[in-house]
Image: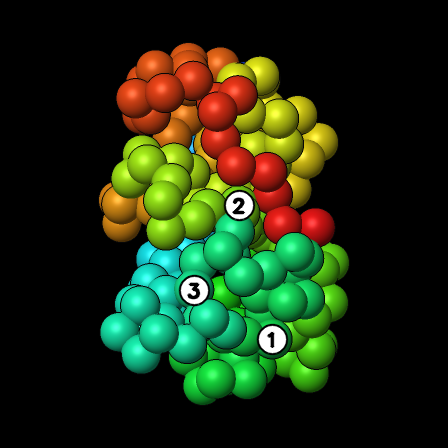
């Protein structure tokens, strides 16, 4: 007598259950993955802001040391983005390509050969701080920090309403959650309305 072996296989219902479980787990993990990517990109933008701060600080310190009135903080010598950018690049504090790289972030791209004097696009906003400005004055922020003291614009680049970067004249900066943009005392000792205007 010949024995017939039956093949064991998954039923359609078992496959659907497994696929459903995988889909639920993926849906739960997606926000965490997206948040981690945003935090990583914001950290890189903060690092870029720090490099620009160091170049600007050295530029201003050299002006104080040498007495050269063409060296200084943006608010002391620049009326526009192009004045400030020309001073930083033409005096060798940043190269043109490094300057452009530091102004890039998620969704905001400056081509390598863009002239430093071009104000757009830029992932960072530079404020007209002066040597006399308080140390807690904002010096650099991510460009999605559109109106200080108000909520972030969801469609604003580079991070929408998820996060923003802020760096103070005193040399400290952090990546903040988007909801913290409306807190006027969270990371500055003075209200946002006292901040210097942005370079345009």
Disc on the earlier residue, 3 or 2: 3
Mark 2 residue element: loop
Disc 3, disc 1: CB below 8 Å? no
Mark 1 residue element: helix
At a point 60% along the width and 75% down the height, the residue shown is 86
* CA gap, disc 3 and disc 2: 13 Å
| Number of residues whose C-alpha sits closer than 10 Å to that of mark 2, classed few (under 14), some (14–19) or many (20 or more) | many
Numbered label attached to residue 127: 2
* CA gap, disc 3 and disc 1: 12 Å
Numbered label attached to residue 1: none
118 displayed left or right of 26: right
Which x, y percent locates residue 151?
58, 17
| Number of residues whose C-alpha sits closer than 10 Å to that of mark 3, classed few (under 14), some (14–19) or many (20 or more) | many
Mark 3 residue element: loop
Disc 3, disc 2: CB below 8 Å? no
Which x, y percent locates residue 23?
52, 26
Which x, y percent locates residue 129?
46, 46
Q: Which residue is mark 3?
A: 72
Instruction: Please state the total of marks drawn on the protein image.
Output: 3
Front one among 52 and 154 = 52
Which x, y percent locates residue 121?
71, 57
77 displayed left or right of 41: right
> In the rendered view of the protein, which quadrant contains the N terminus?
top left
Front one among 144 and 25 = 144
Front one among 50 and 4 = 50
At a point 45% along the width and 86% down the height, the residue shown is 92
* CA gap, disc 1 and disc 2: 16 Å
Above/below status of 192 relative to 105: above
């Amino acid at each position: 007598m010949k024995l017939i072996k039956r093949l064991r296989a998954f039923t359609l219902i078992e496959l659907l259950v497994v696929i459903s479980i995988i889909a639920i787990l993926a849906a739960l993990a997606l926000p965490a993955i997206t948040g981690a990517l945003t935090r990583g990109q914001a950290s890189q933008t903060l690092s870029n802001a720090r490099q620009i701060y160091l170049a600007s600080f050295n530029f201003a310190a050299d002006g104080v040391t040498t007495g050269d009135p063409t060296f200084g903080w943006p608010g002391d010598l620049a009326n526009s983005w192009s004045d400030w950018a020309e001073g930083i690049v033409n005096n060798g504090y940043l190269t043109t390509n490094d300057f452009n790289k530091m102004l890039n972030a998620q969704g905001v791209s400056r081509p390598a050969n863009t002239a430093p004097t071009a104000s757009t696009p830029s992932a960072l906003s530079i404020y007209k701080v002066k040597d006399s400005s308080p140390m807690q004055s904002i010096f650099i922020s991510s460009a999605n920090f559109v109106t200080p003291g108000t909520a972030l614009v969801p469609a604003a680049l580079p991070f929408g309403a998820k996060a923003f970067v802020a760096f103070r004249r005193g040399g400290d900066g952090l990546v903040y959650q988007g909801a913290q943009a409306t807190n006027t005392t969270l990371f500055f000792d003075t209200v946002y309305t006292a901040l210097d205007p942005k370079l345009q």
